[in-house]
Image: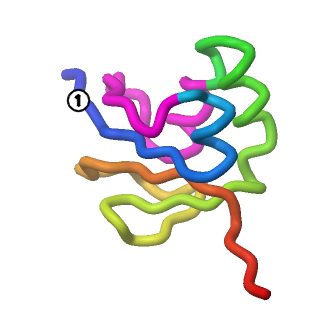
Amino acid sequence: MARSINIVYFAWVRERLGIDQEQVELDDEIESIADVLAMLAERDDRYAEIFADFEKLRFALDQDYGLSTSSIGSAKELAIFPPVTGG
């Protein structure tokens, strides 16, 4: 059974994609954040370039920080953003 998740993009990820969020259908075999990113990277060259080295990105599932290995579970929202640095 397919399920969906809202993906929210921040900072340069949003700028390069040209969108701030999108609703994505997930197949049953999509279990982790890394699986979602691999699926997105197959869409086109923009996605492939952004998610080529996704370990440089940070993630949140339903506003709780997660790792690329984190399970999607029943999350309704995945946020993707670059690391935040302080000054």
In this view, which residue lies farthest toward the bottom? 87
Mark 1 lies on residue = 3
Q: Please name the amino acid that badge 1 sits on.
A: Arg
Q: Which residue is at 55% across, 24% downward? A: 39
Q: Residue 60 occupies which quadrant of the picture?
A: bottom left
Question: Is the residue 51 above or below the residue 63 in the image?
Answer: above
Q: How many marks?
A: 1
Q: Which residue is at 68% across, 55% downward? A: 57
- Between 29 and 72, the residue placed more toward the observer is 72
- Magenta range: 19-40
- Between 8 and 55, the residue placed more toward the observer is 8
28 within the magenta span:
yes
Q: Which residue is at 55% across, 51% downward? A: 10
Rendering coords of residue 58 (x, y %): 62, 61
Rendering coords of residue 16 (x, y %): 68, 32
Side (left or right) of 50 relative to 3: right
Question: Is the residue 8 above or below the residue 66 in the image?
Answer: above
Decide: few, some or many residues near mark 1? Use Cα within 10 Å; few <14, some 14-19, many ≥20.
few
Side (left or right) of 79 relative to 55: left
Rendering coords of residue 71 (x, y %): 42, 53
Secondary structure category for the residue under label 1 = strand
78 within the magenta span:
no
Which quadrant of the rendered structure holds the C terminus? Answer: bottom right
Which quadrant of the rendered structure holds the N terminus? Answer: top left
Q: Which residue is at 27% across, 52% downward? A: 75
Q: Residue 15 occupies which quadrant of the picture?
A: top right
Rendering coords of residue 65 (x, y %): 47, 70
Question: Is the residue 73 above or below the residue 3 in the image?
Answer: below
